Amino acid sequence: MTSALWSQSSQQEKLEQRKAQIQQEIRDNERMLQSVKSKEKSAMNVYSIQKNKIRLKEALINTTAKQLKILANDMYINQLKINKLNRELLELKEDYASMILKSYKSRSEQSRAMFILSSENFLQAYKRAQYLKQYTSFRKAQGEEIKSKSVELVVYNDKLSAQKIVKQKLFNENEKERLALVKEKQEQEKVVNSIKKDKNRIVSDIRKKQRESKSIDAQINRLIREAIAEANRKAALEKAKARALATNSTSTPKEIAKEAAKTNVSSSRIELTPESKLIADNFRANRGKLPWPVEKGFISLGYGNQPHPIYNTLVIHNSGVEITTEEGSNARAVFAGEVSSVQIISPVNKAVFIRHGDYFTVYQNLSSVSVSEGDKVSVKQNLGRVRTNGETGKTIIKFLLLQNTTYTNPQGWLSYK
C-alpha cells in the first residue's frame, strides 16, 4: 500500500509538471495567435495556430483527468487505511476497557499480595509476580498503541480532507478548460466558414506554394548529393594518403590527389570512416531525445503527404516538419556536427545543412545565418534567425532530416515537449 501511494505521488508530480508545461505552451501559442491576428491577411494562418491551441487545451484536459483518476485512487487507499485504523482502534479500546475493568475489580494491594502469597511454592510465587509485572507493562503498551493509532488516524483524516479540496479544485479547473475548449471550437468554426468563402484563391495559393516547395526540395536534393560526393572525395584522398604512407611511396601530394580523384565516388551514400561512423551511431542512439530546432513553438505542418485541414481532397506534401515559433527566434542545432553547406534558397530564405556522419539536418527559412561552411557546431548552438513572413506575420522554420538521400520524419527524432 505504501509503495502504491509513493508511485501515485510520483505520477501526480510528473503530471503536474506536464500540466505546467502545457499551460506555458498555451500562453506562448496565445501570444503567437495575437501577433498573427494583428498582421496576417489570410484566415488560414489564424486557423493553423488556433488548431494547435485546441490540441493543447485537449491535452491539458486529459492531463487533469489523469490527475483526478490518480487522486481518486489515492483517496480510496487512504479511506481503506482509515477504515482499518478505526477497526483496530475499536478492538484495542474494547480490550483495554475490559482490562481496566478487571484491574478495577482487583485493585487493592491486598488482592495482589494475596495472589502472590497464596502460591504453593516459591517458583509459583515468582511466576505470579512476573505475570503481574508483564500485565502492567502490557496494559501500558496497549495505551501507547491506542494513542499512536489515534494520531495516525488524525493524520490520514487530515490528508483525506486536503485531497478532497484538491480534487474539487482539479474538477473546477477541468470544467473551466472544457468550457474554454467549446468556445475555442466555436471560434475555429467561424474561421473555417470564412476560409470556405474564399476557396478558389486559397486552393490556388496552396498549389503555388506546393510548386515552390517541390522546386526547393529538388534544390536541396542536389545540394545533399554534392555534399555526399564531396565527403566521399575527402575520404578517398585520406585513404590514398594513408596507403602512400604505409608503402613509403615517393608520390607527391599532387600525384596522390590525382590518383584519389580517379576513384569513382558515390553521390547517394557516404562511405563512413571510423570517426564519422561513431558520429552517425551517436546520432542514431539519440533518436527521440534530440532538442527542438527552436526553443519554443509547435508543429504546424507535419511530415509527408497529408490532406488539407479544410479541403480534404487537396493533398499537401511536406519533406520535413514546419514549426511555428515566436518572432525573433533563433534556429539551433539539434546535435553536434559539421556545417556542410550554407545556401541562399531565395532572396529571403537561407538554409543551413549540418552533417552528422551519414545523417543530415537542414534548417530552412532563415533570414540570417551565424555559421559558415566547415564550422563545427555543438548541440543547441545558434545557427541564425528564423524569418518572419511580412505578409502573414508567421515565423516558421522548416526542419528536415535525411540519412544520405533518404528523407525521414523528424518528429520521431525530437524529444517530447
Image (cartoon, rainbow, N blue to C red):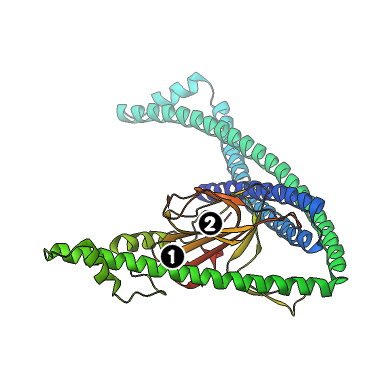
Query: Which percent across, then down, holds residue 402?
Result: 48, 68
Q: Residue at x 49, y 68 (%)?
A: 223
> In the rendering, which numbered label is found on residue 359?
1
Query: Which percent across, then down, holds residue 258?
Result: 26, 69
| Residue behind mark 2 | 415
> In the rendering, which numbered label is found on residue 236?
none
Whole-Å distance between the Cαs marked 1 and 2? 18 Å
Mark 1, secondary structure of its residue: strand
User: Would residue 97 be visible to someone looking at this image?
Assistant: no
- Whether residues under marks 1 and 2 lie with C-beta atoms below 8 angstroms apart, the answer is no
Q: In terms of sequence position, does the residue under pointer 1 or pointer 2 come before the other? A: 1
Q: Is residue 123 above or below residue 240?
A: above
Q: Nearer the viewer, mark 1 or mark 2?
A: 1
Q: Is residue 305 above or below residue 135?
A: below
Label 2 crowd (10 A; few <14 / some 14-19 / many >=20): few
Query: Which percent across, then down, holds residue 23?
Result: 69, 48
Q: Residue at x 49, y 23 (%)?
A: 111
Q: Amino acid at mark 2?
A: Ser
Q: Residue at x 49, y 61 (%)?
A: 361
Q: Amino acid at mark 1?
A: Tyr
